[in-house]
């Protein structure tokens, strides 16, 4: 049985060390979460897979790692200072603050909110008599007003001195546009080619958002793919398929995915066409990845504002033009949550016992192999340590070494963190019990089938690889 509610996954994440509430000992902070030791391994493995698949293994892609704080002129040129807005509304009774479109969507999912002005959203909320989700009062909302999502901060260490207002980046895309010329000159790539990046983006989100689904800071992986204008539809279809192909490779069931085209009203200020890949979460169908055709909007605006020539010159024909852009964007934090939701399973075993098991794709499982001496007998622990050292030296597998509790409890614990293989070292392994496994052999238990296979230690590296 997969997760029926988000709470089951939130609780497992806290219990096992995937994700904790941010600054918890001070009462936490809305929309802020910290990744624990397992959550970090999981997120980093997804990140590394993405980089390998979309950057390292492609001839038409290069990656960069850019600064979070950029010259504020970047955000004026990109249109974010002007247009990166949500409409917020306050409850006069309890002082709760909400995103006006979310208030409507949550109660009336069929009412169209995309592209509506704050005045129009206020009108719908009044007309439908939507109550405050926090205190339940009706008719106590202020009018909705525009709120810019860019996170403002200031440069300048000494108080009293003139400080410069700057923004934490609201999307990582702009670094790829402002570095277009540098990358072109140094990489000698030809159109079509992409510039990729992974990093934190920051948004002053108003509504608390379903665990890590909507947070103030989040990890993004995206690339800007530079093309000739006439190719845009072909490239759009190709990258939409690629986003979904990779999700299948990770192990996301196709039946939990769908694509949704943005309506004209809903399109971001830079986009001519956008499609979202959505996932069927316990709180409804929600955007997982996006794909936008940004035309030549960004490069043209940066050319205008910076005065730099951002044309591409075809070395064969000398044709000079501003490339158009297809932008596939993969929310890494959001994908990590979806992977957790998708992996979560509660099962009843043949003997009637119940177990919770995270069925991660082995490539991203935070622990891939657990080494478990059957008891705390010193000889078993020494043998298990020997095996740990071999695997650690001869493979890149992520290992765990666990001696605490009964073997049954340890299996349950490894199931709950999604470890694909457990290796048990018993008295047979050290030649001290004919009724257990053969001398120099261990038992390899499979997380999903629960099969147990006896493997000679000399063959263990090959079997696990
Ligand atoms: N450069 C384009 C861009 O940033 P976006 O649709 O605003 O597009 C991209 O964001 C992806 O980032 C989304 O598809 C989603 O996965 C993720 N995302 C957006 N806002 C988020 C938030 N507040 N918390 C977590 N992930 C978020």
Image: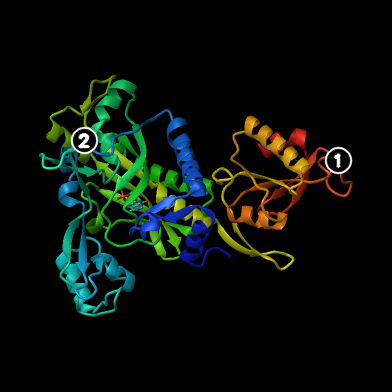
Q: Nearer the viewer, residue 320 or 302?
A: 302
CB at disc 2 and ligand 1 closer than 8 Å? no
Specify the label residue 112 is tagged with: none
Residue 112 at what x, y percent from top left? 26, 67
Callout 2 crowding tier (Cα within 10 Å): few <14, some 14–19, many ≥20 = many
Residue pictured at 47% horizontal, 61% vertical: 10
Check disc 2 and report the residue beneath it.
299
Indicate the quadrant where residue 148 lies: bottom left
Residue 249 at what x, y percent from top left? 53, 46
Q: Is residue 422 left or right of residue 63?
A: right
Callout 1 crowding tier (Cα within 10 Å): few <14, some 14–19, many ≥20 = some
Residue pictured at 50% horizontal, 62% vertical: 11
Q: In which quadrant is the C terminus drawn? A: top right
Task: Decide: is 238 above or below 125.
Answer: above
Question: Can see residue 188?
Answer: no
Q: Report the coloring of the rendering.
A: rainbow
Q: Is residue 420 left or right of residue 294?
A: right
Residue 179 at what x, y percent from top left? 26, 30
Q: In which quadrant is the N terminus drawn? A: bottom right
Task: Decide: is 57 above or below 380.
Answer: above
Check disc 1 and report the residue beneath it.
431
State if disc 2 and disc 1 touch (CB < 8 Å).
no
Q: Nearer the viewer, residue 52 or 431?
A: 431
Label 1: which secondary element: loop
CB at disc 1 and ligand 1 closer than 8 Å? no
Q: Is residue 193 left or right of residue 7?
A: left
**Mark pair 1, 2: CA separation:** 70 Å
Label 2: which secondary element: helix
Which sits earlier in the primary sequence, circle 1 or circle 2?
Answer: 2
Q: Nearer the viewer, residue 117 or 148?
A: 148
Residue 74 at what x, y percent from top left? 19, 38
Choose mark 1 or mark 2, whichever is in front.
1
């Amino acid at each position: 049985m997969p997760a029926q509610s988000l709470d089951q996954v939130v609780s497992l994440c806290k219990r096992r060390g995937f994700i904790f509430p941010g600054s918890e000992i001070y009462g936490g902070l809305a929309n802020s979460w910290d990744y624990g030791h397992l959550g970090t391994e999981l997120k980093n493995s997804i990140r590394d897979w993405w980089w390998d698949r979309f950057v390292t293994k492609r001839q038409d892609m290069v990656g960069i790692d850019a600064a979070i704080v950029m010259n504020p002129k970047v955000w004026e040129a990109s249109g974010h200072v002007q247009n990166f807005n949500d409409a917020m509304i306050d409850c006069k009774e309890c002082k709760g603050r909400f995103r006006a479109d979310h208030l409507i969507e949550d109660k009336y999912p069929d009412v169209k909110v995309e592209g509506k002005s704050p005045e129009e959203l206020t009108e719908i909320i009044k007309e439908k008599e939507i109550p405050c989700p926090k205190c339940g009062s009706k008719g106590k909302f202020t009018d909705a007003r525009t709120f810019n999502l860019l996170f403002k901060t200031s440069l300048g260490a000494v108080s009293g001195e003139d400080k410069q207002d700057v923004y934490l980046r609201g999307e990582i895309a702009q670094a790829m546009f402002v570095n277009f010329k540098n990358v072109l000159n140094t990489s000698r790539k030809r159109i079509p080619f992409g510039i990729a990046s992974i990093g934190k983006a920051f948004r002053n989100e108003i509504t608390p958002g379903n665990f890590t689904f909507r947070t103030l800071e989040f990890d993004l992986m995206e690339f800007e793919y530079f093309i000739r204008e006439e190719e845009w539809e072909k490239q759009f279809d190709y990258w939409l398929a690629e986003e979904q192909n990779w999700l299948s490779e990770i192990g996301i069931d196709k039946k939990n995915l769908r694509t949704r085209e943005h309506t004209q009203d809903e399109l971001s200020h830079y986009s001519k066409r956008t499609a979202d890949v959505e996932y069927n979460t316990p709180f409804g169908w929600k955007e997982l990845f996006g794909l936008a055709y940004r035309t030549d909007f960004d490069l043209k605006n940066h050319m205008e504002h910076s005065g730099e020539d951002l044309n591409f010159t075809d070395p064969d024909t000398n044709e000079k033009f501003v490339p158009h852009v297809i932008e596939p964007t993969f929310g890494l934090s959001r994908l990590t949550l979806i992977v957790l939701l998708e992996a979560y399973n509660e099962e009843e075993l043949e003997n009637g016992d119940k177990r919770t098991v995270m069925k991660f794709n082995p490539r991203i499982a935070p622990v891939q192999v657990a080494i478990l001496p059957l008891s705390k007998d010193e000889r078993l622990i020494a043998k298990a340590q020997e095996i740990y050292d071999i695997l650690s030296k001869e493979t890149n597998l992520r290992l765990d070494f666990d001696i605490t509790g009964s073997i049954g409890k340890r299996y349950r614990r490894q199931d709950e963190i999604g470890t694909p293989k457990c290796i048990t070292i018993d008295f047979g392994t050290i030649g001290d019990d004919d009724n257990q496994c053969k001398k120099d052999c261990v038992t390899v238990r499979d997380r999903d089938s629960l099969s147990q296979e006896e493997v000679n230690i000399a063959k263990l590296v090959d079997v696990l690889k």
